[in-house]
Amino acid sequence: MNLLELSRIGKRFGGLNALTDVSLHIERGEIYGLIGPNGAGKTTLFNVITGLYQPDSGEFHFNGKSYRGAKPHVLAGDGIARTFQNIRLFANLTALENVMIGRHVRTRAGVMGSIMNSQATRLEEKACRDKASELLNMVGLKKPHQTLAKNLSYGEQRRLEIARALATEPLLLALDEPAAGMNATETENLKALINAIRDSGITVLLIEHDVKLIMGLCDRVAVLDYGRKIAEGVPDEVRNDPAVISAYLGVDGE
Amino acid sequence: MQNAREVVFRRLNKRIVLIAVLLLLPFAVDALLGRGWLRIVDFAMLYIMLALGLNIVVGYAGLLDLGYIAFFAVGAYCYALSASPHLAIAFPRLFPDGVHLSIFIVLPVSALLAGGMGVLLGAPTLKLRGDYLAIVTLGFGEIIRIFMNNLNAPLNLTNGPQGISRIDPISIAGISLNATQRIFGFTLPSVHLYFYLFLFFAGLVVFVSQRLERSRIGRAWMAIREDEIAASAMGINTRNLKLLAFAMGAAFGGISGTLFAGFQGFVSPESFSLMESVMVLCMVVLGGMGHIYGVILGGLLLALLPELLRHSVVPVQQALFGKTIIDPESLRMLLFGFALILVMLYRPAGLWPSRVRRRELSSDERPNESA
Amino acid sequence: MEIFLQQIINGLVQGSVYALVALGYTMVYGILGLINFAHGEVVMMGAMVALSALSVMAGLPPLVSLPLSLFLAISVCMALGYGIERIAYRPLRHAPRLAPLITAIGVSIVLQNLAMLIWGRDYHSFPQLFANHAHRIGGAIINDIQIVIVVAAFLMMAGLMLVVHRTRLGRAMRAVAENQHAAQLMGVDVNRVVSITFMIGSALAAVAGVMVSANYGLAHYYMGFLLGLKAFTAAVLGGIGNLRGAMLGGLLLGLIESLGAGYIGDITGGFMGSQYQDVFAFLVLIAVLIFRPSGLLGERLAERA
């Protein structure tokens, strides 16, 4: 049973077909890469999977359940966590608080429990705090955990976003251009981190511009162009696919 | 180990001093400034409760509620109807002497009622953008007032613009707070008794706010305030949590309203105008959104301001011009308006911001293009 | 039937005024994505300034004094609109959304209380300048002022549509509404366009203010609040950000209100009377937000959180 299966997903914005009949599946435990030129529909697909957009056609299954019109918080609860291309941290909360908010779906304390500060609440709060600092250490945040998120460097913010997503204990971690704006060393570290995450049993979906990173990291890769999937397979196959070459050479001059 | 104990002791000492000061405050005010001022301090306590309630909505969850006073009105009318002879007019057979329930029955009821109304109002609006909530609450505050003004015919429920009077004073265990009482050898006039009652409730509101602020719920509220989309991607049910904030704020408003009705013994629609909502909002904004002590400071300042103005503006103008040109009431509102503008432009985190907000709002986000 | 027709006429007259004010809300929203909370007070100021001007020029023939005072009211309101944008909105364009809302509320409180200081708390009666003939149409009555209001409102709306769709300025406005950043890159002076938008909206508001006071013969420092709230409702009903929507919404809201007020007594068996007229706008607002938050002619809004 595949972890995620998309069948014939379509999404339109006004007259623009952002996604057309995109079908793909992601197996448990793999790192799956999604590449494509600018405006190919990668982030749109991402937003469909994480519930930010509702697809106009098609459906998707995740972990054996079918979803149609599910809200982001439901999908997060069911095990899809994400990061954002243009980092969206809770800028004025501390790094620790950011990750603790990621624990929201895995904790229970309600209004009464919080007001009474019951034994259960205190234990949960402590466990939440411990888990959060453990995750911060895991992603390698060196600054004090009480630093406000917006005072972290760009690379650190990206790591913090990953820690926050991991705090939801996802089955599928979806990373939207995690290496954007990183230097070579940072990218190397990120690669190691993503591998470590996969080794801990979490499936990873990766959108990247950096083709080299994708090819070196992913088990399988899909290529989107103009909202359609034009190729899929192991990195070596995809690299030599004529459709992919023409899409990249023809459209993307960078 | 010893160090930790010392810290605990110091904290405890601080708290004991604070409580002692608060307990002695009514005597000090009474002796130094007179009983009239103590009454004003009592009202200030009610406003502080209101402001703390609104702080949950505006400060934590980042939702702008412009009709907050409506929930205060709901609480006030709740007690006015269920603890006065008034209902005898509308239902002479059913309640020949009116209804006279204890405040301790009415308090939870009005909290629930106000909270429920908050949910009813918030449910359709909270999924939309924040400015819609602002407008809808603004309208709601006005509607409540229209109903209070007009529900006196054909069935006299609210007595219209005249309002409801002869409301039962609050009494606890048979002791009426409207009379001077001797307790443990202390002679406590009515205003002192009310002060202690309100102190208790204000303390409760502070306690609840503090606990919530540092909890899973509070963090979720602040996440919504910071970035709603990221919050929902982290599994936070933003709609429900916004509703919760809105309902809790409303419930606090209802509780304060009930106490207000019992204290004043009289309610009329006049006490619940839009300007009152604006004043409570001012308290929160001026003091420091999201910071409990800042909000308390804001509440205290703005509740005392009209009295200060009354005692200064009129005599000064009389002396200067021989007549009153600007009455203290409109001067107060003008000052509120200017305060809202100036604080948001130059000190958006308020006079006494919390650690986090202080860094946040005075930050790099301020553009320079206007210069 | 006569009552019905009369309510329709009243609704159309009131609705034209709502439409003019609603245009101000919708233009600002279209461009900045923000509600101009102080817009209702601009309407009030327009009425008050015109009223004062008329009383100063009481000796002049009405054909001179009316255009002059209208001109004065429009100028003052345009200046106000410009000032509101400069003080309350521009410095906070990139601040958290809560901030400009709060400053705008501050501005509207200041305006309201300034008006109270200048003109007092009393109702002022608006002078009757021309003989106001009443005409009978099928048993209902419409008077000259009402005809002028409807005609003038329609002319102004048509003029606005021309400006927005046929001129360079209009094209710049639409570009900024579509994408501020892109418009700037294309050489549009965004600040200028935003300022002009506020000023045009305020000019319409000034005229609307004069219309309302002429129709009811009254002006009051507090009149802007409810009028603003209702015009906003009209804008939402039509689809905020959409000019045609604002006009449609204004007219519809006027009709709903006047028919509602005319028949509420019958509907509730006499329990509620026309004093609840002001409640209708609010019920419409809530209903629209629940069932069609995008309004009648608008695009979807909810997703753009």
Image: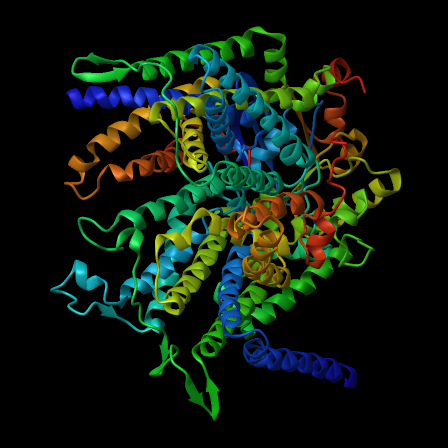
Reply above or below: C201 against A64: above
Reply above or below: A63 against B101: above
Total labels: the figure holds 0
Residue C159: x and y in percent read 49, 9
* Quarter of the image that includes the N terminus of chain B: bottom right
What residue is at 65 percent from the left and 57 percent from the top? A100
Residue C302: x and y in percent read 49, 34
Reply above or below: B250 against B34: above
What residue is at 36 percent from the left and 37 percent from the top? C282
Q: Residue furthest top?
A: C166
* Quarter of the image that includes the C terminus of chain B: top right
Q: Is residue A203 among what the camera can see?
A: no
Reply above or below: A197 against C262: below
Residue B6 left/right relative to B190: right
Q: Is residue C215 among what the camera can see?
A: yes
Q: Residue furthest right?
A: A185
What residue is at 57 percent from the left and 75 percent from the top? B29
Q: Residue furthest left?
A: B93
Residue C115: x and y in percent read 51, 36
Residue B190 left/right relative to C255: right
**Observer-nearest residue: B150 or C161?**
B150
**Observer-nearest residue: B339 or C120?**
C120
Residue B99: x and y in percent read 23, 68
